[in-house]
Image (cartoon, helix red, strand yellow):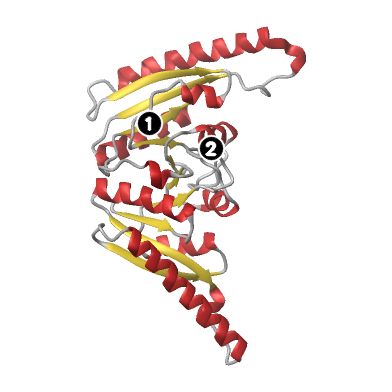
Amino acid sequence: MNTALVGYTQDASGQDALALGRLIARHAAARLLVCTVVPEAWVHPSLGAVDQEYASYLEEHAQETLESARAALEDVPDVQYIRQAASSATTGLSEAAAQHGADVIVLGSSHSGSSGRLSLGSMSSELLHLSSLPVALAPRDYAAQAPADGHITRLSCAYAGTEVSNTTVLEALRLATLLNVPLRVVAFAVRDRQMYPSLAGFKAENMIVDAWRERTGAALERLKEQLAGITPPVESVMADGEGWDAALSNVEWQPGELLALGSSRMGVLKRVFLGSNASKIMRAAPVPVLVLPKVG
């Protein structure tokens, strides 16, 4: 990763995004862009006094927002602060990322969720459906929890034992190699409470989950054989739980770890699109999540 673009707002979510952007930039020796988006009317004011006052207000607000980001990143070198005029935050961040050659867009979590967990807002949800770049999301209150040494320790990749999932693992391996960190492949054996009709009963559910666990375990073993001898080393683990929160809690997570999720097979072209299970994993993840766009 050469350039990370942080979508910044002057609130706690923006501070969380800055903390994750700092982590990525420091570890990868990447250029950090901090972007605040303002309404498009800001660059096209009329001669009317009201419009001029509104344009002045937006400019002052943008400057104040970027100054607060500078104060938070005063110890980080090679940071560029930009304001992007656009019809929406999603459009502005996408345009800024394309104009400045960003490799990843970094966002904070909506603060409607629980501390230490991810919660998508309307803008981040829209961006995940439209972005052709990886999107990194920081959990709520990540600014207070981020590792002080500023290093990514490991990249984990959620694995479903499918051909599409194998492609995601290969992309995660490419990123882990670039970042010079170990890769861990994690498969989840979860009995979702709403997976099957209630008339089927728990016995039927357990049989299906057990069959899935056996099939995915075999796929993990084959993947492990294929990746034997790879540097950085690749670890594999199966996580069980009576729900996604339990499954992710049953996995050990390191400070500075990132969790990579692949785009759904239903994604449009090479854009990011989260499937049902990926969305559930994201909401239960206790670490920042890197959502990868569809590959190929």
The location of residue 106, given as percent across then percent down, is 42, 51
Q: Could you tell which of marks 2 and 1 lies nearer the N-terminus?
A: 1
The location of residue 150, given as percent across then percent down, is 27, 44
Of residues 221 and 120, the one drawn nearer to the viewer in this rendering? 120
Q: Quadrant of residue 193?
A: top right
Label 1 crowding class (10 Å Cα cut-off): few <14, some 14-19, many 20+? many
Q: Quadrant of residue 178?
A: top left
Taking 65 as reference, is 24 left or right? left
Check disc 2 and give the amino acid type.
Ser
> Quick one: SS at disc 1?
strand
Q: Quadrant of the C terminus?
A: top left
Q: Are marks 2 and 1 in contact (CB under 8 Å)?
A: no
Of residues 237 and 48, the one drawn nearer to the viewer in this rendering? 48
Q: Nearer the viewer, mark 2 or mark 1?
A: 1
Question: Could you tell me if residue 161 is visible in this image?
Answer: no
Residue 156 tag number: 1
